[in-house]
Amino acid sequence: MIVAAKSGVSKEQMSDRVLKGAKYVELHLVPSDIDTEEKRNDIIRNVQETGLEVRVVHTPINRQYNLEGLAKSEGFKTIEKTCILANNISKITNKDTHIVIHVELNLEQLSMWGLFDVIKERLSYLLNEYPHIIMDIENETVIELFNGRFEFKNSGRLEHINVCRRLREELKTDRIGLVLDTCHAISTIRLLQFYIDRGVHHNIDLKDYFLEYSEFLNVIHLSNAREFGDNKNHGTGFDTDEEVDLLREMVEYIREIEFNGVLTLEVQEENYLDTKVYSKLHGQLRNLFNIE
């Protein structure tokens, strides 16, 4: 297992991660980062000049660039540009590069609306055209407050494991996997607890996520969620005794499933040019749990 920092594509952000002791990073993109070959080459140059090793690239976080976005031209083009960047990074590292992508619908919905076959066809093209990428599907929070309105995600619990499994089976590939985002998992568990308490929904706990994901798990996004994980409570660190106990619990689950992928410390910062929350969490893992 390797531990990675989250970073934007600028040399300033990457240099901060080096200063904070990071060796590996997961790059988080916005569409304008990758819209031209020149910009993608600039990212490669920043990576080489800072000496970081990129192991994961996150597609731009916007629902039109989710897995469902492969069905439309705009989404497909941006996702393909992410694949081009990741494949070029692999030529430097001599290792496959993981691409993180969200999905909002469950397998039943994707199938009955005709989206699954389109996604499968276009994923097949991308995996064949860019042989050094691995596509990993990330869990989302089941309910999210976005621009003042609630959004509901039907892949928010464990349902997208079925999407992953079906794609692997039909495309006959092991280059599709999963990302477990612990902040999204914690938020979802707390939100569903209202229904669980009323006997409407069957119970699920954090250990279930780790155990259910373990078969196809390539990347873990490790962070905390305060309250329901909205806005400033999303992707937080572990500061109180109770939060450190939660971190300890998740580290035990990571060990129990013998995870050997990329552990990205995907935490929110006040200043992404001075990553204090990342530094503290990295220190906690190193000092409390002997994880480098």
Image: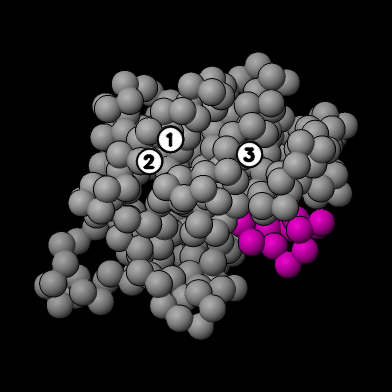
- Identify the residue at image location x=13%, y=72%: 200
Q: Position of residue 144 (x, y in %)?
A: 43, 71
C-alpha span from label 1 to label 3: 13 Å
> Which kind of residue does numbered mark 1 sit on?
Arg
Would you say 259 lies left or right of 28 here? left
| Front residue (pair 158, 112) | 112
Q: Position of residue 190 (x, y in %)?
A: 34, 69
Query: Which quadrant of the figure contains the C terminus?
Result: top right
> Which kind of residue does numbered mark 3 sit on?
Lys
Name the residue beneath numbered marker 3: 81
In the drawing, what numbered circle is on residue 119?
A: 2
| Front residue (pair 62, 94) | 62
- The local secondary structure at tag 2 comes to helix
C-alpha span from label 2 to label 3: 16 Å
| First-in-chain label (1 vs 3) | 3
> Which kind of residue does numbered mark 2 sit on?
Ile
Q: Is residue 76 above or below residue 98?
A: below
- Identify the residue at image location x=21%, y=74%: 195
Few, some or many residues within 10 Å of mark 2 (<14, 14–19, 20+): many
| Front residue (pair 273, 77) | 77
Instruction: Confirm or deny contact between disc 2 and disc 3 (CB under 8 A).
Output: no
**Colour setup of the view:** one colour
Few, some or many residues within 10 Å of mark 3 (<14, 14–19, 20+): some
Q: Is residue 178 magenta?
A: no
- Range of the magenta residues? 267-281
Q: Position of residue 70 (x, y in %)?
A: 45, 45
C-alpha span from label 1 to label 2: 5 Å
| Direction left: furthest residue | 199
- Identify the residue at image location x=59%, y=73%: 232
Name the residue beneath numbered marker 1: 122
- Identify the residue at image location x=66%, y=52%: 31
